[in-house]
Amino acid sequence: MTRKQKRLAIIGAGVGFLTAAVLLVMFAFSQAVAYFYVPGDLAKADLAPGTRIRLGGLVEMGSVKRGEGKTVTFSVTDTLASVPVTYVGILPDLFREGQGVVAEGAFVSGSPVFVADTVLAKHDETYMPKDVADRLQAQGVTLGGKENIK
Amino acid sequence: MIIELGHYALVLALATAIIQAALPVLGVRRGDRSLMDLASSAAIVSFLLVFFSFAVLTFAYVTSDFSVRNVWENSHSLKPLIYKVSGVWGNHEGSMLLWLLILVFFSMLVASFGRNLPDTLKANVLAVQAWISTAFTLFILLTSNPFARLVPAPGEGRDLNPVLQDIGLAIHPPLLYLGYVGFSVCFSFAIAALIEGRIDAAWARWVRPWTLAAWTALTAGIAMGSYWAYYELGWGGWWFWDPVENASFMPWLAGTALLHSALVMEKREALKIWTVLLAILTFSLSLLGTFLVRSGVLTSVHAFATDPTRGVFILAILVLFIGGAFALFALRASHLKAGGLFAPISREGALVLNNLILTTATATVLTGTLYPLVLEALTGDKISVGAPFFNITFGLLMLPLLFAVPFGPLLAWKRGDLAGAGQRLFAATAAGLLVAAVLYHAKNGGPILAPLGIGLGAYLILGAVTDLMLRSGIGKVAGRVAARRLAGLPRSAFGTALAHIGLGVTLIGIVAVTAYETETVVEMKPGMLAEAGGGYTLRFDGMREGRGPNYTEDSGHFTVSQGGVKVTEIWSSKRLYSARRMPTTEAGIRTFGLSQLYVSLGDEMAGGGIVVRIWWKPLILCIWGGALFMMTGGIVSLSDRRLRVGTPSRARKAPPLAVGAAE
């Protein structure tokens, strides 16, 4: 092999591999990405049943009901609209009524109930998922987080 | 008073850094030795000043001086001493000071141990280090001053975020920063080489120990962070592909690539330009990580405070350094002479493949991490890119590398023999397939990919062992000769083997946990039994209240039995930290060999029962055990005489006595 051919072989392998990587990334983006919504956006969003989304907002006061065994139901609200959510499992330590929450999952066909498989309310008592804070602030809701700091 | 002295020391450190940033470069241009030598003394003074400053802040934490705002916000007089100390870096301001301390620490090391570096190179390297430290000292002083006072001083502090009150978190940030910031030395060497327009194999020999040291520390830091998330957050996961995790993982990937390309450059003088580029890239990713984590664009446990000026400031530093470095690279790279021819099938070729795959994988992780930020900035759409994305892209891209790893060390430099290497790996391949077949049979079928993955791990481990066996001639020559040859192998050969074994061990852990873990969520009342997985049964005995220095807790007691015989017991608890009224989960974990039983408590139900989440995590310790192997490999490699910091070619001139002593 001449120097030129060797260089060509290496560049060829590189370009081939990069192309594969780009295709893979594009495929993964079409499959494995969840959009974020607050309840008020859902009406105009027109989601196909089964589409994975992240639903964010506040846990509505008085809405948390522990059903039989491990199932929990609660509502997520952005003060404009409210969506009932069911979740099987253990809620995070910082899950509380009136606090920010993000639920990841999908709507089941023909039902208004959002079935979550992941519920995030993490790390800090003043934690408000950034997405939620932005949306809520945009809608003029004052956030309760700050008063909790004594 | 002492607080103000700490603040003042930091201001002095800034002045010293500015001197160190400017005068040595001038000295190099004018050929003025005394100006160049200034770099070393300035680096040492800088370190002492920042160290003093850091010590003062630590003192404020230990004595619970709540007149310092930072202490008040993040400490509590009842906190155990170790968490008072670790609280110093458990917040934005303090952690930036730690970042700076480690940066000047590395400059000091270069100054003290780089005696045999050429004067001009050393002066330039230290100057570039000072550019970075100037920027970050300014950042701390202008936007994140940890010494700001609070008048009047409150009587009690607000306590450290309870999830950070943990021994893992006491060690994780310093180790991670040692890695992150350690790559700054590689960056400075690269920039200095570009400024001088000259680069050779000796350069790679000087850079490699720093890369190794930073890489080893980063490996430890990431593993520690992962283990902390696993046991402290109570979610049972060990890696979430969270943006902040990716922020530390990307420099690690690029650093791994740098480690390998520097090898080619050192041995064969090839891949020069690429190595310089990688050195710049690796530290750029470290800076990007600092930006992502510290600017508040991401919300997570690491984003302590969101203050827009800080984000803009770090972004400016980021743009300045990365942009400047790449501009310099574009201008000067063509001046660097290429050298070292090699065939595609050769050790060099294998290392190029390693670099190709690692950098592509880094790029996909980068894409997945930044895409949501970019998309939101462009369209306002908010999306989350989660684990599935990274599992598909990163997982598939890394797969060919895993197959190729054992081949690398078996190929000769310049021109290798692929078929020969394959033949010598026959035993390892066969053993890997055998492991997969036996496992497939033992699990009565089930998914085929999991046994294959574990077989691949076994192949990696045995492939690394094969390399050592071949080099020492075990099985070919008499046992004593082989043992002597094995002992005579360079330490870096063992380092390589250990790191590659570690890769295999981690892979086995990941596959085993992903495929075979069992999760049981069950509501339990005292006296009830639950299948825990792994053949163990769990009995819930009841709850007990307790209290610690700054929290109260409800603990559940469980008895673990196997086949009706009691094996051990587990306490799992939920704590409420009094100062912040913040609950945390303290999972109960018991280790059985390399596997673990993981119990975390949920809510108490109306009827007196409690929701319990039980995981059986088979071989989970392999994940971090593999990292331990990699770190050991890094340390063993670092102790190689040929690579010891500051022991390059000129050591030959040393008197024979000194050489004998070094043996």
Image (tube, rainbow, N blue to C red):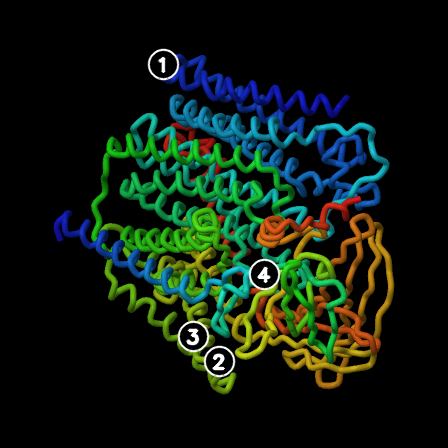
Q: Amino acid at mark 4?
A: Gly
Q: What secondary structure is found at the residue carrying circle 1?
A: loop
Point out which mark residue B439 bears: 2
Q: Determine whether, in the image, residue B329 is placed left or right of residue B90.
A: left
The residue to which callout 1 is attached is B31
Residue B515's place in the image compared with B352, above or below, is below
Location of residue B601 in the rendering, given as x and y in whole percent from the top left corner: 74, 68
Query: With B310 as the anchor, is B449 left or right in this view?
Result: left
Secondary structure type for disc 3: helix
Q: Nearer the viewer, residue B562 or B18?
A: B18
The residue positioned 63% from the left and 24% from the top of the image is B10
* Residue position marked by numbered label 3 in the rendering: B452
The three-letter amino acid code for the residue at tag 1 is Gly
Give the residue number, with chain letter if any, for mark 4. A40
Q: Are marks 4 and 1 in contact (CB under 8 Å)?
A: no
* Residue drawn at 46 percent across, 47 percent down: B377
Q: Nearer the viewer, mark 4 or mark 1?
A: 4
The mark that comes first in sequence, 1 or 2, is 1
Using the image, tell me which numbered label, if any, was put on residue A61.
Answer: none
Q: Residues within 10 Å of mark 3 (few under 14, many from 20)?
A: many
Point 49% across, 30% down: residue: B132
Image-quadrant location for residue B398: bottom left
Say whether residue B469 is visible.
no
Which chain letter matches label 1?
Answer: B
Q: Give residue B179's position: percent from left, percent from top.
A: 52, 43
Q: Are marks 3 and 1 on the same chain?
A: yes
Where residue B331 appears, as percent x and y from the top left, is: 28, 30
Mark closer to the chain start, 3 or 2 = 2
Q: Is residue B4 visible?
A: yes
